Structures are given as C-alpha cells and as structure tokens.
Image (spheres, rainbow, N blue to C red):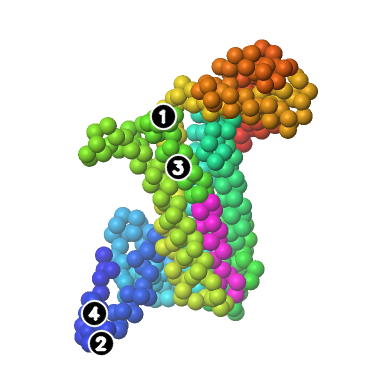
Amino acid sequence: MADDTTDTKSSNQMWGGRFASGPDAIMEEINASIGFDKKLFAQDIRGSIAHATMLAHQGIISTDDKDKIVHGLNTILSEIESGNFEFSRQLEDIHMNVEARLATLIGPAAGRLHTARSRNDQVALDFRLWVKEELQKTEQMLTGLIAAFLDRAEEHAESVMPGFTHLQTAQPVTFGHHCMAYVEMFGRDRSRVRHAIEHLDESPIGAAALAGTGYPIDRHMTAKALGFREPTRNSIDTVSDRDFAIEFLSIAAIAGMHLSRLAEEIVIWSTPQFGFVRLSDAFSTGSSIMPQKKNPDAAELVRAKTGRINGSLVALLTIMKGLPLAYSKDMQEDKEQVFDAAESLELAIAAMTGMVRDMTVNTARMKAAAGSGYSTATDLADWLVREAGLPFRDAHHVTGRAVALAESKGCDLAELPLSDLQAIHAEITDKVYDVLTVEASVASRKSFGGTAPSEVRRQIAFWRARN
Ligand code: ARG
C-alpha cells in the first residue's frame, strides 16, 4: 500500500518535527482521508456505475465510453476486493483513487465519469449507502438479540426473582418478565433503526457541488438504480447534510445505553454474592493471579463500548455545529466516528446475544433472593385492603409494623406466627399466608404488562408475532 509519502523537500526548521519534508507533507497528512474512506470503495463504485449509466442514457456521454467506464470500474472492484489495489495518499480519498486507476485502465474515457457530479455529492452518496447498509445490518442483529431474549423469557416465564428499585429488593417478578423489559428496549431501538432508514432513503447524487447542474441528468433514474426511494429535493442541503450519520450515532448511543444497563446487570448477577447467572466460559475470563475468579469481561467491555459510541455522537454533533452551508472539509471527519461506533455497536450486540443465549440461570438462587427483603409486603397490604376493607394507606401502615416485627425477630413475613399478625391487626386470618409466597405474589399481578406468568406469556406472543 502506498499510504506512505515519499518526500524530497526538506523539513521546516520551525515546525517540521516529525514531518520530515515540510508543509506539503503536513497538508497531505491532514487532508488525506484514504486511510479510512477506502471502506467506501464498493459504494463509490456502485454509485459511479449508476451515474455513468444515467449519463449515457441521457446522451451526455457515449454508450461506448459508458461501457468502458463500467468495465473499468468492475475491474477496480475486483482488484480492491482481492487486495490487489494500491491506495495512494497523494490521491487523497477513495473517489480520486478509483478515478485515477480508471484512467490508467481505460484512458481518456475515464475523464468523462465526473461529468455533472462533484466529490461533494459523491461522498454524500457513498456515505449514505454505507450507513443504510449498516442500519440494515443493525436491524437484523437487534432481531437476533430480541429472539435470544424471547427464548429465555419463555423458558423462565415462571422463574421468580427479586425485582429491584434503587437496587433494593422491591417486589418479586419473573425472570421472563425482566427479559421482556429488554425486548421492549431493543424493540424500540429497532423501530428507530427502521425510521432512520426511511429518513435517509433519498439519493444525493446529481446535487453536484451544491447548485445542481446544467446537464440534462435524470436524478430519479440514479435514485432508482441505487435502491433509494427518491432523489433528495434541495441540492444545497444535500451536500451539507449529515443528519443520517448523526441519526445513526444517536440510535447507536441509545442502543448502547440499553446494552450497558444489561451489561451492568450481568456483572452484578454473576457475582458470587448474587449468583443469579453463570456466564459461559466463552464470555468470561480467569484471573492471572486469583485462580477462583471468573470475570465477566465481555459484559464489562460492552459497558465500556457505550462510552465510546457516546463520544462519537458528541464528536460529530460538534463537528457539524455552526458549519455554514454547504460543504466544508470539516465534514470529512464524519466517517471515522461512524465507522468506529458501528464496529463497537455490532460487537456489543453480538456479544450480548451470545451471553444471553449461553448464560446459565440459577433459578434456586433467584427464588431464595426473591423471598428475602420482605418483598411480599405489598401483597400483605393488598390483602388487608381486599379482605379486611382497609384503606390502602392504613394497610400500608399495618404492614410496616409487621415488617418491623419480622425484622426484630430476624424472620420473613411468612414466618411470623398468626398470633403476632393478629396482635398487629385483629382481622388477619391464616388465609393471609397464601399471598405471602413469592409465587402467589407474581401470579396475582395480572394487570396488562404485569409480571404474572400468564401476562408474560401474552407479552412473548405479542413479540413473537413481530419478530
Ligand atoms: N474526502 C472528502 C470527504 O470525505 C470528499 C469530498 C471532498 N470535496 C471537496 N470539495 N474537497 O468529505
């Protein structure tokens, strides 16, 4: 690869430094994007083939020249795909690298490809095509993650675990219900992805530098050939817009935030103190010094990738902030942020899908924890409302006294003798013990969206039909 510069000029005394050859080399280094935008080669070639085909159809270039261009571009595509292409930093970016090679391959006809087009609409096209494909990939990966959760939810529709607020035991829930909370989150992420695809589904090519062109081009034809719904409507906006990239990063940041919450729960659940889940060896590592350890590295890294994705979002928002219309070279800095975030997001979703599928759920530990911490106190209060006709606030107060008594005796609510409970409130009967078990507690919560196994199964069926 010819990414290196071969310089003949001498270094500038004042600020040459590592730039052995002076200002020309610095300019080349700051200006060149080929190091990262070569990722866009397939989109660049597809775009150029569609553009040349349209130019010939409109009689702007000859069919003969178009045939040579298309043939040459296909040759370049296979050269790059097979690793037989020399990228040159002197040629700045992917667009000029491809065009220069085309000239070597087919001669003067190559010079006709750039008719009625500028690198400004070309890069907008290539990048949009890339982001669109990435969004489609993200949609599929989210579908896979949702499927993994649906399977675990079905398997554990009845498995009781403590539900938390403030990370303090709140009320018993089912593990299936908890899994379905993530299905809702990743389902929203996926619908954001779908909306973003709709938003960006407009073809930029033909906006030219910023003002459109005097050639009789057909932008609807290129839009269709490239799989876009329609062409963009305003040429100035077209070359200055990077909303599609920012939307991708926003979606990635929100999905990353969801993934990091799951990652954190897995970190907590897999501690010996919780012991709710055991990660497979594939997604954990040992310690080099402490033989007993099994660390949730993959989950920790997913948690960290989220920070990186957030950084990319803020970086691109900041790059675009305050830029005058239309194109400015600042916008060349858009790609690395998106490429890096896309790689992080893909890895994070893949790792999480694997972890969710592979982890062993310790239902006995979950159930034991679900019953501790007076998690059925609300059920006792509800029983007093239902069976003894107490206003909920009074029932809350009575229950509080029962909890305090149990606490002082070092036992669970269900372990308090009936005489103790009756001393707190005379109308309590032994029927109350039916609602103090965690199973009874979850089974009773049949409200729409609630944690009862029957309700969780209904939620699963809803999502199965949509996945
Ligand atoms: N490499 C450039 C980019 O990524 C391509 C567009 C260059 N346009 C220009 N007017 N210099 O933004």
Q: Secondary structure at mark 3?
A: helix
Q: Amino acid at mark 1?
A: Gly
Q: CA distance from mark 3 to mark 4?
A: 45 Å
The quadrant holding residue 92 is bottom left
Tell me whether the residue at label 3 lies in contact with that at label 2, contact meaning CB atoms closer than 8 angstroms. Answer: no
Q: Residues within 10 Å of mark 2 (few under 14, many from 20)?
A: few
Q: CA distance from mark 4 to mark 1?
A: 56 Å
| Residue range corresponding to the magenta coloring | 236-254
Give the mark, 4 or 1, whose residue is nearer the N terminus. Answer: 4
The circle on residue 14 is 2
- Per the image, the residue denoted by label 4 is 17
Residue 142 at x, y percent in the picture: 51, 42
Residue 317 at x, y percent in the picture: 52, 66
Q: Is residue 239 magenta?
A: yes
Q: CA distance from mark 3 to mark 1?
A: 14 Å
Q: Secondary structure at mark 4?
A: loop
Tell me whether the residue at label 3 lies in contact with that at label 1, contact meaning CB atoms closer than 8 angstroms. Answer: no
- Per the image, the residue denoted by label 1 is 275
Residue 136 appears left or right of 19: right
Q: Which numbered disc, 3 or 2, marks the residue closer to the eye?
A: 3
Residue visible at 47% across and 46% down in the picture: 260
Residue 79 at x, y percent in the picture: 32, 59
Q: Amino acid at mark 2?
A: Met
Q: Secondary structure at mark 2?
A: loop
Q: Amino acid at mark 4?
A: Gly
Give the mark, 3 or 1, whose residue is nearer the N terminus. Answer: 3
Residue 280 at x, y percent in the picture: 36, 31
